[in-house]
Image (cartoon, helix red, strand yellow):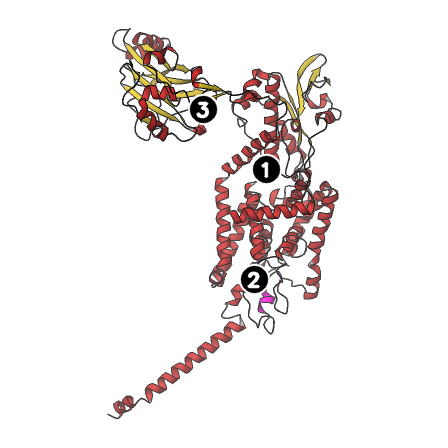
Amino acid sequence: MALISRLVATFTFMLALLFGSAPANADGPPVLSRFITQIPASELVEGATAYGEMLEQLPVVPVLNGAELMGYAYITSDFVGTTGYSGKPIHMMVAIDPDGKLLRAELVEHHEPIVLIGIPESKIRAMTDGYVGLDIVAEAAAEGVGHDVDIISGATVTIMIIDDSVVRASIKVARILGLGGLDNSAAESGPTHVLNMDETTVYDWNTLIGDGSVRRLTLDVGQINAAFAETGDPRVLRHAEDGPDEQTYIDLNLALASAPGIGLSLLGENEYGNLTEWMDEGDNAIVLMGRGLYSFKGSGYVRGGIFDRILLVQGDVSVRFRDRQHERLRVVAAEGAPSFTEMDIFKIPADSGFDPTKPFRVQLLVQRPVGPIEKTFITYDLGYNLPARYLTALAKPQAPVVETEQTDTDARSLLWKRIWQSKKLEIGLLVGMLTVLTGVFFFQVQVTRHARGFYWFRMGFLTLTLLFLGFSQNAQLSVVNLMALGASLREGFSWDAFLMDPLVFILWVSVAVTILFWGRGGFCGWLCPFGALQELSNQIARFFRVPQWTLPWGLHERLWPLKYMIFLALFGLSLMSMSLAEHYAEVEPFKTSIILKFARGWPFVTFATVLLGIGLFIERFYCRYLCPLGAALAIPGRMRMFDWLKRYKECGSPCQTCANECFVQAIHPTGEINPNECLSCLHCQVLYQDHSKCPVVVKQDKRRAKMAQSSSAAALDRLTNHPHAKQKGEG
């Protein structure tokens, strides 16, 4: 991993020097001021007649119908980072009503290559129409993941960035303006207190109960019977609790044991020491103590199960305890504590989102059978608020109107990490493919020893590349990726946009590594979905005896430079106009054939079909002569550290077998392999060991056979002329 990190850093530094890197200018008027003059209110929200004056210190304008306030409009990039795959912001204009529901979200400006050409306008419109009615109050409670994202095939990164920016910017505006009852103060101020770890005074039971360090819920039999009777289900009356109404049904006591003073008071010094060792950093713990007819743990609890009668709730955080988060407490150490039949400690994991300094409650589930297997339930809440002496106040930070760069970076980081988490299976399969391919290259002699077995292995690998990386995951690398990286470096580089598509990112890292070892062939020959499509279709054509054309060497050699000329032209255009370069990058048929799967306008489909059609007669025609991505990878590929492909001194003079059978004609008539054109198919290594095609191997086999024959004859002669053999014969 350290080697890969250094390689990626070096690659980035070289590109930064090449393109020049200047941070984006964050100063200047709000982006909104530009778009409210371009997009009338009536086009943004149906029924609107005008915009009001922009709010003071906030880039938001009211949306009006006459004098009536319909909502507010804003641009997402005024509040959160919206840098897309192109390295430039994606501007979304959003309108929200006073109840916190979105009225409209419209894509007003962007430079995303996949959306500029290829994605139909109707798909973008359908995606943005899906935001109408989105409840931002609910999104705030669900931390921005309370809805499904309508991903458009081929534009995953762009759509994820749009969705993230719309939701986060809308939550921010709603909180600042107090829409839908959202409160800005809690959201912006963050934690206000931390536990006072210096408060270690030990108190008796009466003091703990009196100041709220221990909170208590007491229910008697009469209360429970009355509560179940109020449910209106007559069956509960047949199972009413026996005994006098004043008998204790449950006496439940709750305390925050991770506060040192409370923990030491209730557990004692030794048990509290065990608790601190049991908890990891950031964990908390509560202690529950109960007595009466009803158990808060329940008799149905078993090892490996869940305590289904209790639930910790704090805002939108809920914690259900399992056995591994539970320890029994033998005795309550506080002086004057009553006796309890149940005393248990429950650990609250650090990643649960629980804040011990804020109010919370434990929800108790009381159940009663109403049939052989059917039960009815009632819940009771035992609230808890930590006394002030166990808290240390923090200085209240100033709440920024617009999200800081660090806050925005953290949010974008959470977004790509969430994407990677959801793609674990796909990432594992790609890493497996890269591992297998690396093994093939390192052990190429052993792998290519059996020609037929290696052929079917290669066909299977290319099929997986086409179906999985290509058609399923749209992980097709493109020269547009390189141009987007260059634009990002010029305007303020950030990894976030590139990390949004984990498979493409991993493929680019693998390309950076394999170029140093094997040149462009690692990707172009094995991992490029369009290359796999060409080769597989050509193999099918060969099966049906479609004639194959071999271009004369002189013409073939003169066509090589075309792809380099195309790449340099696109590179030059990208320095002048990124949008223009992205348009001309359509010389790559990848988007049409792999990403959009030919669901596109007829000129693009015709172009891709013609290229594939030529490839039926001239194998890998596009890869050989037109691919700008192949040219871009071939240039640094000249720096590869090793020549892995084995050759005999007879290769090229007089033997031309490998040159004649190389399907991309990467071998010169003189025997040298051109690393710029070689796709690392390893067919020459198959021939290198072929006992019927390679003249050198055939000659070696004949020499060995002749030597073996001579050795056998000599041994027979020695045996025949041996004195003992003669005596035996005479006898």
- Please name the residue that numbered disc 2 is placed on: 643
Q: Is residue 187 magenta?
A: no
Q: Amino acid at mark 3?
A: Phe
Label whose residue precedes the other's in the sequence (3 or 2): 3
Label whose residue precedes the other's in the sequence (2 or 1): 1
- Please name the residue that numbered disc 3 is placed on: 354
Q: Secondary structure at mark 3?
A: loop
- Please name the residue that numbered disc 1 is placed on: 496
In percent of the image, x 43 and y 18: which residue is there?
Answer: 390
In percent of the image, x 33 and y 17: which residue is there?
Answer: 367
Q: Nearer the viewer, residue 259 or 48?
A: 259
Measure the C-alpha gap from mark 3 to mark 2: 57 Å
Q: Secondary structure at mark 2?
A: loop
Q: Where's residue 448, x and y in %?
A: 49, 62
Q: Amino acid at mark 1?
A: Asp
Q: Is residue 644 above or below residue 36?
A: below
Q: In this picture, which residue range is highlighted in magenta? A: 655-682
**Residue 527 appears in the figure:** no
Q: Is residue 659 magenta?
A: yes
